[in-house]
Image: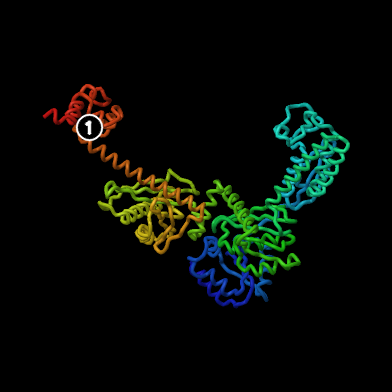
Amino acid sequence: MQNTKIKELRRKAMSLPLTPGVYIMKNKSKDVIYIGKAKALKNRVSQYFGSQNNHSDKVRKMVENVDDFDYILTDSEYEALILECSLIKQHMPKYNILLKDDKGYSYIKISKPPWSKITAAKQIIEDGSDYLGPYYSSYYVKNAVEEANKIFKLPTCTRRFPQEFGKGRPCLNYHIKQCSAPCRGRISQSEYQNNINDAISFLKSGGNISIKDMESRMLEASENMEYELAAKLRDRINAVKKMTQKQKVVSVNVQKQDVVSFAGDSNLGCFSIIRFDNGRLYDKEDFIIREPGDASSAMSEFLEQYYTIRDTAPPHIYVNILPEDYEILQEWLTQKAGRKAHISVPQRGEQAQLISMCKNNAIEQLAQQKGYRGSDEAALEELSGLLGLEKIPEFIESYDISNLSGENNVAGMIVFRNGKPYKQAYRKFEIKGFAGQDDYASMAEVLTRRFDEYISAKSNNKTEGFGRLPDLILLDGGKGQVSAVRPVLQKYGLNIPLFGMVKDNKHRTRAITTEGKETEIISKRKAFTLISQIQEEVHRFAISYHRQKRDKKTFKSSLTQIDGIGETRAKALLKYFKTISRISQADIKELENAPTMTKPAAVTVYNYFHKSNKE
């Protein structure tokens, strides 16, 4: 039924004109579920109803729910963009990237004297306090209030003055010289009010004017031999300058600009934006997006939505991924701002460093959303980009073969979940299909048995362990191992990314390989570290299993070959005597005293190790 509907929609799409316009996808209830723009309607819309193999999961889900579509012709791509933004804002379709304009305004609150406090506030309350603002950025207000309280040593606690004078000890802020401790009477009311006035001046001027005023007062105090006051003003000036220098770390030569970075994959992503004005970072925002789809398309949709809910746009917007149709976006932003606007991807210099900082912030936010560390997310994202994966690999399976001249042929399977070993999913395999040494055939056998287990688990509705497919398979080996396993994946109809991990002559990770070519990974430090950890871990796990099998076989070939000595009694003997050598040197009485042993068994063991004497 669904295929019939898609064919019907494709026929309708093929009749569309090759002109710009907006298309409106609707479900069976006639609800608008997606709105898009197109340079050529026929080409864009017909793509949705062709082969589904090339679509992202988000697009496939959307297409499955499309029952019909409408379209509106426009005279240009620019008009199509304007109309698209307007319609998205009106209908809020389910499958478009939607951002809520819920920031509101923020204020700096100065409570009524005496003993005023400076805090951040979301709204004005008629309580006798003074308010600075409104400010659009809550980020700026929070940081400005924090700076002012630290520099001028104002209390940030919940104590009320003068009601709570002398009650309790000074808090930690006093001991680290970030509070003047009015709670303990360490500062007079007049001096405290002067600090409040200086802090307000600092907040209003941004530091420059307040520094000049304090320098003038410091010189005056010095001339009047008020050296203690001059020293306090000197320390305060230095604190303001230090804070200003700290801000220069994230300042830029361009007066007004936004920096936007995307991190994630087609299933879950994060857009981070840092905003600059007068060369200073004044706002930061993060947006978690579920199923953003293709990164370039997602960036285009995000910028449309973000600047739709903003009053204006800066002259420069730097991004880490160039949005599709960015020329049209530039034209729209230019019109919105009333001056030329540029969108670009910086490749080097200060702007490239800001893009990197912004992306790291997006990675950290994404990691918090998923519940693990930002460094792990960064490594996985770098690995995903390096290997050209469609999504960041949450589950990675890795395999290694271990044997000694074909003896005790085994394999180890390890799992990394979110960049960390997931040991409860580790598995061991004993090679059963043949005798001797053949790493390629061994690897093929192991993967075949693994996916046989998957089929079995799937039929029993099990989604853990073997019932979960990996997002990436890494084999400890080169092109040969990859070529041996590829047919196994094809046999089961699985499209799982498959790569080999190649070592150098010192047994260190060197590259990633497919059947066709090798990809050098040393320059990608985060991905390289992760791959190295995986390769070392799978080798350790496989070789430890091989040693275990070899030791067990050696164990069986000695004690368990003695009549009347099974594995239980053999283990007890080893535990008691510690070594085979000490067992062989023990007399009958000592053997008889060992746990689980009897006199006949002791005689048998003694005779086994003293055949020549017996003879």
* Front residue of 472 and 406: 406
Q: Please, which colouring scheme is shown?
A: rainbow
Task: Indicate the position of residue 85 as horizontal and vertical percent values.
Answer: 68, 65
Left or right: 103 in relation to 352? right
Q: Residue furthest left?
A: 615
- Residue at 80% over, 37% down: 232
Q: Is residue 527 visible?
A: yes
Task: Indicate the position of residue 609 as horizontal and vertical percent values.
Answer: 19, 30
Dot 1, crowdedness within 10 Å: few (<14), some or many (≥20)? some
- Residue at 27% over, 29% down: 573
* Front residue of 227 and 49: 227
Task: Indicate the position of residue 149 as horizontal and vertical percent values.
Answer: 76, 40
Left or right: 220 in relation to 1? right
590 lies above or below 110: above
Q: Find disc 1 in the rendering and name its residue.
A: 565
97 lies above or below 207: below
Q: Amino acid at mark 1?
A: Ile
- Residue at 34% over, 43% down: 545
Image quarter of the C terminus: top left
- Residue at 72% over, 48% down: 245
Left or right: 496 in relation to 599? right
Task: Indicate the position of residue 460 as horizontal and vertical percent values.
Answer: 40, 50
Q: Is residue 29 visible?
A: no
Left or right: 25 in relation to 253? left
The total of numbered circles placed on residues is 1
Name the quadrant containing residue 181.
Answer: top right
* Front residue of 420 and 452: 420
